[in-house]
Amino acid sequence: MKRFTFWSQAYLGFTFNWGALLGWAAIKGSLDPSIMLPLYASGVFWTLVYDTIYAHQDKEDDLKVGVKSTALRFGDLTKEWITGFGFACLGNVALSGFNAELGWPYYACLAAASGHLGWQVWKLTFHRVLIAIGNLSQISGLELSYLVGSLLGGFHHSEGTVSLHE
């Protein structure tokens, strides 16, 4: 894809996150579009965040061999694009949780993850690629926070406590 478009990271997101749809269908035996489409979209946007950061380590080589990437496309505006993708990711995750009627712990963990992501993007620097990659490895806390929030939010809802839809 890198030979044809600057958006190879989006293509990766569309293909890689297909597993969210398949996993839901395998566990639930159905697809609920109000939950699954925002979850899928959030995965695509998350892939655009992390893979654009990774793409910055290959910019010089990509230019030499004539391939494209979002890192080359966005250039000095990468942080702004990543911020937008981050907002889109978190907004879709919140919508998916709302539609799944997850309880308040989900949103508490999502708020913590949002703050962590914002802090990581704010301190991100691309002129020193190894620092950017090191910052990205710290973002995995966002994924853990989302997992914990999903589990606690689902448990909170299943225990018959007050949820957002009651």
Image (cartoon, rainbow, N blue to C red):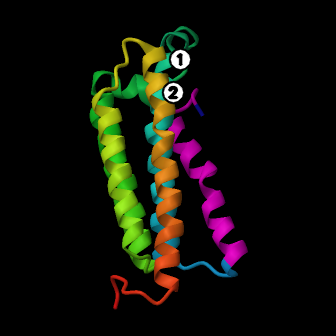
The residue beneath circle 2 is 54
Q: Is residue 10 above or below residue 51?
A: below
Type of amino acid at the residue the image marks with label 1: Asp
Q: Quadrant of the N terminus?
A: top right
Per the image, label 1 sits on a secondary structure element best described as helix
Residue 67 belongs to the span the image colors magenta: no
Task: Looking at the picture, tell me which residue is in the foreground, 53 or 123.
Answer: 123
State the residue position of label 1: 58
User: Which of the 4 image quarters holds residue 26?
Assistant: bottom right
The span shown in magenta is: 2-27
In the drawing, what numbered circle is on residue 113?
none
Work out how far the residue at label 2 is from the one at label 1, CA to CA, in angstroms.
Answer: 8 Å
Q: Residue at x 34, y 91 (%)?
A: 166
Confirm whether residue 33 shows in the render.
Answer: no
Which secondary structure is most common in the magenta stretch? helix
Mark 2 touches mark 1? (CB < 8 Å): yes
Residue depicted at 27% across the width and 31% down the height: 122
Q: Give the image location of residue 156, x and y in percent.
A: 47, 78
Q: Quick check: 65 left or right of 81?
A: right
Instruction: Assess disc 2: are there few (<14), some (14-19) or many (≥20) residues with their C-alpha within 10 Å of its C-alpha.
Output: some
Q: Decide: few, some or many residues near mark 1? Use Cα within 10 Å; few <14, some 14-19, many ≥20.
A: some
Q: Residue at x 49, y 69 (%)?
A: 152
Residue 153 at what x, y percent from top left? 46, 72
Relative to 135, does residue 32 appear above or below in the rendering?
below
SS class, disc 2: helix
For the residue marked with disc 2, what is the amino acid? Answer: Tyr
Q: Position of residue 112 (x, y in %)?
A: 35, 52
Residue 29 seen: yes
Q: Residue at x 53, y 17 (%)?
A: 58
Q: Is residue 101 left or right of residue 165?
A: right
- Rendered location of residue 8, percent (x, y): 54, 36
